[in-house]
Amino acid sequence: MTATTTPNGFTYPTGGDAVGTLDTTVQSLAEQIDDRCGLTKSGVVSSPGTVVANTNYDVAVTFTTPFPASGPVPYIAFASVGVAPDLIWPPQITASSRTGFTIRFRRSAGTQQMSAHWIACNVGNW
């Protein structure tokens, strides 16, 4: 029989566990630690190469695996790069989930590509 720690709920084998169940218990523990240790993901996302002023451009960012593996949706923060601040609207996150998010770019003038550095923070699993 397995038990769990307090307050984080990690599973661990107890003296009554059969040797044959230890592999699944250890796997469960490893998966829980892996999920909780992956506290951030980050990257850079860009609009299409040439844009039209006053037009929204929604760009999807997809995580290769759900992040976090369980629990709440991560918090997404970002900063625009490479474009004068007076020429762009602040990027917006228009949708987010554990599998990714969508960021919206919009310029008030010009046609230059826009980029944003982003970071997804797993703040809810601890």
Image (tube, rainbow, N blue to C red):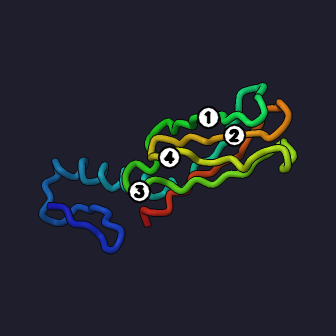
Identity of the residue furthest to the front in this view: 54
Q: Are marks 2 and 1 in contact (CB under 8 Å)?
A: yes
Q: Amino acid at mark 2?
A: Phe
Q: Nearer the viewer, residue 65 or 51?
A: 51
* Residue type, label 3: Pro
Q: Are marks 4 and 1 in contact (CB under 8 Å)?
A: no
Image coordinates of residue 111 in percent, x first then y, are 83, 30
Q: Place residue 14 in its image quadrant.
A: bottom left
The CA distance from mark 3 to mark 4 is: 11 Å
Can you say which quadrant of the picture contains the N terminus? bottom left
Callout in the foreground (2, 4):
2
Upstream in sequence: badge 3 or badge 4:
3
Residue at (70, 34) in percent of width and height? 55
Kindly identify which numbered label has been placed on residue 72: 3
Residue lying at the far bottom in this picture: please name it: 6
For label 3, count other residues whose C-alpha is less than 10 Å away and answer few (under 14), some (14-19) or many (20+). some
Q: Give the number of the disc on residue 59.
A: 1
Which of marks 3 and 1 precedes in the sequence? 1
Question: On the rendered structure, is 68 left or right of 91?
Answer: left
Mark 2 vs 4, N-terminal side: 4
* Residue with the mark numbered 2: 105
**Element under label 4?**
strand
Alpha carbon of mark 2 to alpha carbon of mark 4: how far? 15 Å
Labelled pair 2, 4 in contact (Cβ < 8 Å): no
On the image, numbered disc 4 is attached to which residue? Answer: 96
